[in-house]
Image: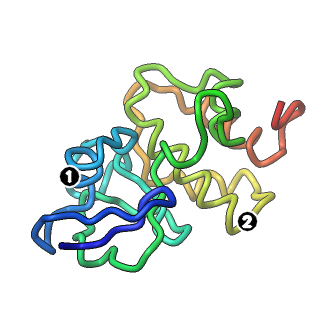
């Protein structure tokens, strides 16, 4: 048994220590915010926060998560009370297909936790390794800047 702390709750997981965190999140805990994209840690769709840092859950083994605080998209906010980053993405309609959104939102959340008022350059750097194939980059940047308080009406 491996004990994980996910979204503020302890979970005892019966899985091999080298199992990718993503599989446990999706298959055992039914947390479908993180997506399977490339399986190589390169596209960002599987991003979660581990101790407040953006991490690619498809390449992180369970045994590397023991004793650490894991937060998924579901742990940020609810439909009724979205996290300010989620609310900014809603306000800016920053999605087309939505597949990349988990990684975009989680990467911006991690950035804002360490730098509450980032520059546009810092936002671009934080999103550098998150792929969006639909071309929603302009809306995603506006949402990120809104969440950072750099757009009028932030946190509406």
In this view, the residue in front, 9 or 154, is: 9
Q: Which mark's residue is nearer the viewer, 2 or 1?
A: 1
Task: Please determine whether, in this image, residue 154 is positioned above or below residue 111.
Answer: above
Q: How far from the left and from the top, in percent, is residue 29?
A: 29, 48
Secondary element under disc 1, as helix, strand or loop, is helix
Identify the residue shown where x is 65% and y is 35%: 82
Q: Nearer the viewer, residue 42 or 39?
A: 39
Within-10-Å neighbours for mark 2: few <14, some 14–19, many 20+ = some
Name the side, left or right, on which 109 lies relative to 19: right
Instruction: Say which residue appears at 77% left-offset and 48% top-offset.
Output: 148
Is 66 rendered above or below residue 28? Answer: below
User: Is the N terminus in the top left, top right, bottom left or bottom right quadrant?
Assistant: bottom left
Residue 18 in the image: above or below residue 131: below
Is disc 2 in contact with disc 1, using a CB cutoff of under 8 Å? no
Residue position marked by numbered label 1 in the rendering: 23
Q: Position of residue 11 (x, y in %)?
A: 33, 62
- Foreground pick, 2 / 35: 2
Q: Residue furthest right?
A: 152
**Number of marks drawn:** 2
Tag shown at residue 62: none
Compare marks 2 and 1 and give the one earlier in the sequence: 1
Report the front residue among 121 and 93: 93
Circle 1 Cα neighbour tier, 10 Å, few/some/many (<14 / 14–19 / ≥20): many
Query: Split into 4 quadrants, where in the image is the C terminus?
Result: top right
Determine the residue located farthest toward the left in the rendered image: 16
Tell me the residue that label 2 is attached to: 115
SS assignment at label 2: loop
Instruction: Tell me what residue is drawn at x 63 percent, y 60 percent.
Output: 111
C-alpha gap between disc 2 and disc 1: 30 Å
């Amino acid at each position: 048994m491996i004990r994980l702390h996910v979204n503020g709750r302890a979970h005892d997981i019966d899985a091999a220590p080298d199992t990718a965190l993503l599989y446990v999140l999706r298959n055992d805990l039914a947390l479908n915010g993180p997506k399977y994209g490339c399986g190589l840690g390169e596209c960002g769709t599987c991003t979660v926060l581990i101790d407040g840092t953006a991490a690619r859950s498809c390449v992180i083994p369970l045994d590397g998560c023991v004793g650490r605080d894991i937060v998924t998209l579901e742990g940020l906010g609810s439909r009724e009370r979205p996290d300010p980053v989620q609310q900014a993405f809603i306000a800016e309609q920053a999605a087309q297909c939505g597949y990349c959104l988990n990684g975009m939102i989680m990467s911006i959340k991690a950035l804002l936790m360490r730098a509450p008022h980032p520059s546009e350059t810092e936002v671009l750097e934080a999103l550098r390794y998150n792929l969006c194939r639909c071309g929603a980059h302009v809306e995603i940047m506006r949402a990120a800047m809104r969440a950072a308080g750099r757009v009028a009406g932030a946190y509406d």
